[in-house]
Image (cartoon, helix red, strand yellow):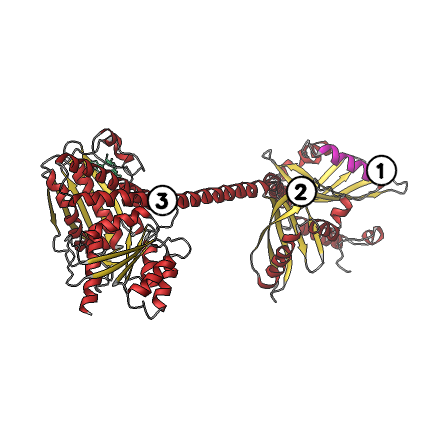
């Protein structure tokens, strides 16, 4: 006989005893095999319940519990109370209609805990249709239920996150040519869309795309294409017209999934409303632009103001210098004139400082960094501060600690300004008969430190944080010491532009020590920096000329003309011709053949540069040295002048000694030639 598990009633009744035993044994093997199933059979006529299988054992129910479980009432009690009503309902339905029973519910373990089980059953009915037996199987689906629950939680979490992030999500399947959009995509731009249009992804996409600002659409389309083609990042911000006619800024970020062949199959991503951030950014940009414009206007104003201020200052300083050679003044009158000159010089320093500060603030301060020998700069500064120090009996000394030949990376003119600022502060804020020492040290291979140490009043702790604040004189404004409170700000900025740093220590009653660190320069080439003009004045106020020399001065300002007449009038060797406009000046140059021409730059009609060009091109005048004398005193003005071919470039207010030095140089060259 075939070893089938299911036999009809006739087949069963035809079995002999041994066959029946074999059949039962086979069934028992199956029931007890470790299949994990639980089998049960409920006899409705006597309400008895038979059970078997590993499932029950896993729940802890063993043969000893047979009596307890066999009572069908107790069996029902094993079902979790929450799952019982539905389970009962489904069973009643099955009994009534024969409808397939397949449910999951929790079953109690012997320990009193619950496991999830899946239950499938069927019933056997008599001829009248009454149910005689209900038999079924249960198996454990706890692990599956736990996974399902974890997935449900994770989905819920994702939904919460997406809702919380206020982002819209979308997905585009390139294979199936379908789009999915979450409703948020349209909500965030205040556009209403019917559920059917939203479900029809292509329609929804067109509806969205048609609202992208015309100026942004090209970049919008391009970003998608290039992400698909060349895998570039898909992260774009663009403007979209909202349903309320407002313009929204939307940020789209996405990532494609590429197949093995490198084709994009799916792109998923998010849309966020970034309107507020964009508007804030625009506001910041606008205020930055306004601030920059204002700053430019300020710089412009300061540089034209300085030009305007230099011209009258030129007269004040120039004319007061003349009194030095006046013998019929009383001592008192000399002192008065000296006061005028000192005030003028102070004013000039202020103008220069403010100009520097304005240039630094507007980022227009350009330094030419090159290898500079600090010891040379220091010596030049010593020469300049020595006389002031002497008037107050302050000893100035320096110690270079064998660093005389070390170069630093700096701008020679600006380094001099830095050291002069620190050294003159060290004298100004020193006590009489005090000391000022400058010490070079090298803390490491790359750095040179320059310490400027004084024995002055010191800076109180409470004031230290204001030291580098513009126009803050820390109370020195109450004293007779002159100053503007910008020197140290400029000093710090200059040092920093040169790649260095500055710090200080100070103790009230003992003194202060400002220390500048600069980077050593590897290059040992000779310094290219031309010694600044002021230093070239060798302080002799004598013209060293053998022959008579004719000088033509072209200048439109009457007071400057008079000043020059008086400055040079003292020298018998000089014949000065003055002309107040360029055309006439050129005529005089051709006809009078002067030995040297001094040319103002800002002339009416034709400016100094144009006049210079004519002089250079005219064979009659091209050999004559030409000096520019101008109130355009910025470094780039001087550079431009020298590049244009002026033999020298002097700035107003004219420094007498400087003028003499230049005349000595150029006219002596003339004579030599
Ligand atoms: P100024 O000297 O023109 O006032 P600075 O910017 O050079 O401006 O210096 C700012 C202030 O710092 C000075 O007014 C002074 O009060 C203080 N200060 C600067 N250097 C020293 C110093 N070596 N000793 C004491 N105080 C100093």
Magenta-tinted stretch: 84-95
Q: Mark 1 against mark 3, which lies toward the viewer?
A: 3
Number of marks in the image? Answer: 3
Q: Nearer the viewer, residue 388 or 424?
A: 388
Disc 1 target residue: 96
Is any atom of residue 438 visible in this view?
Answer: yes
State the SS at label 3.
Answer: helix
Q: Give the quadrant of ligand 1.
A: top left
Give the prevailing secondary structure in the magenta stretch. helix
- The first of marks 1 and 3 along the sequence is 1
Label 3: which residue?
308
Q: Secondary structure at mark 1?
A: helix
Write down the quadrant of residue 551 in the picture. Answer: bottom left
Q: Earlier in the sequence, mark 3 or mark 2?
A: 2
- Pick the quarter of the image with the C terminus: bottom left
Image coordinates for residue 635, horizontal then vertical, percent: 32, 53
Question: Which residue in the protein does label 2 denote?
Answer: 189
Left or right of 86? Residue 524 is left
């Amino acid at each position: 006989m075939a070893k089938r598990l299911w036999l009809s009633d006739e087949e069963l009744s035809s079995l002999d005893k041994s066959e029946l035993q074999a059949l039962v044994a086979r069934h028992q093997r199956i029931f007890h095999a470790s299949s994990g199933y639980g089998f049960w059979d409920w006899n409705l006529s006597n309400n008895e319940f038979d059970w078997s299988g590993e499932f029950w054992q896993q729940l802890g129910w063993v043969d000893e519990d047979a009596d307890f479980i066999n009572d069908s009432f107790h069996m029902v009690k094993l079902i979790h109370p929450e799952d019982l009503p539905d389970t009962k309902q489904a069973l009643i339905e099955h009994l009534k209609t024969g409808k397939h029973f397949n449910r999951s519910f929790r079953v109690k373990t012997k320990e009193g805990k619950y496991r999830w089980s899946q239950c499938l059953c069927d019933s056997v009915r008599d001829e009248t249709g009454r149910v005689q037996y209900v038999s079924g199987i249960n198996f454990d689906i706890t692990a599956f239920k736990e996974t399902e629950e974890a997935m449900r939680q994770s989905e819920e979490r994702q939904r919460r996150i997406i809702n919380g992030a206020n982002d819209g999500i979308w997905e585009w399947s390139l294979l199936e040519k379908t789009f999915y959009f979450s409703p948020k995509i349209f909500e965030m731009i205040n556009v209403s869309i019917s559920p059917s249009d939203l479900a029809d992804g292509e329609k929804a996409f067109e509806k969205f795309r048609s609202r992208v600002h015309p100026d942004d659409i090209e970049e919008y389309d391009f970003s998608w294409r290039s992400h698909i083609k060349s895998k570039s990042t898909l992260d774009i911000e663009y403007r979209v017209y909202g349903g309320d006619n407002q313009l929204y800024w939307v940020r789209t970020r996405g990532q494609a999934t590429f197949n093995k062949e490198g084709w994009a199959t799916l792109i998923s991503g998010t849309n966020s409303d970034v309107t507020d951030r964009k508007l804030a950014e625009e506001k910041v940009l606008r205020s930055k632009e306004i601030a920059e414009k204002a700053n430019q206007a300020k710089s412009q104003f300061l540089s034209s103001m300085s030009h305007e201020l230099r011209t009258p200052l030129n007269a004040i300083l120039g004319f007061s210098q003349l009194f030095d050679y006046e013998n019929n003044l009383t001592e008192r009158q000399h002192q008065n004139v000296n006061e005028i000159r000192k005030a003028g010089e102070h004013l000039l320093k202020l103008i220069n400082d403010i100009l520097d500060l304005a240039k630094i603030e507007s980022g227009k301060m350009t330094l030419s960094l090159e290898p500079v020998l600090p010891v040379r700069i220091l010596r030049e500064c010593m020469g300049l501060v020595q006389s002031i120090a002497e008037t107050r009996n302050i000893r100035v000394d320096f110690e270079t600690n064998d660093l005389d030949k070390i170069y630093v990376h700096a701008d020679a003119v600006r380094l001099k300004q830095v050291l002069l600022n620190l050294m003159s502060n060290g004298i100004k804020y020193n006590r009489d008969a005090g000391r000022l020492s400058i010490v070079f040290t090298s803390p490491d291979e790359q750095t040179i430190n320059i310490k400027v140490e004084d024995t002055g009043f010191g800076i109180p702790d409470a004031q230290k944080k204001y030291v580098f604040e513009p126009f803050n004189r820390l109370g020195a404004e109450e004293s007779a010491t002159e100053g503007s409170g910008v020197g140290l700000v400029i000093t710090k900025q200059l040092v920093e532009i040169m790649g260095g740093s500055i710090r200080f220590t100070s103790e009230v009653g003992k003194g202060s020590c400002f220390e500048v660190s600069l980077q050593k320069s590897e290059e040992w080439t000779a310094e290219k920096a031309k010694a600044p003009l002021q230093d070239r004045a060798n302080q002799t106020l004598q013209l060293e000329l053998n022959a008579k020399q004719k000088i033509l001065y072209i200048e439109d300002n009457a007071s400057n003309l008079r000043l020059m007449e008086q400055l040079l009038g003292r020298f018998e060797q000089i014949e000065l011709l003055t002309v107040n406009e360029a055309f006439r000046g050129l005529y005089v140059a051709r006809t009078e053949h002067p030995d040297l021409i001094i040319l103002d730059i800002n002339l009416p009609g034709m400016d100094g540069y144009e006049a210079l060009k004519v002089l250079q091109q005219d064979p009659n005048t091209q050999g004559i040295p030409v000096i520019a004398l101008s109130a355009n005193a910025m470094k780039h003005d001087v550079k431009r002048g020298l590049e244009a071919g002026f033999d020298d470039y002097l700035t107003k207010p004219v420094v007498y000694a400087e003028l003499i030095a230049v005349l000595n140089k150029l006219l002596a060259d003339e004579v030599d030639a």
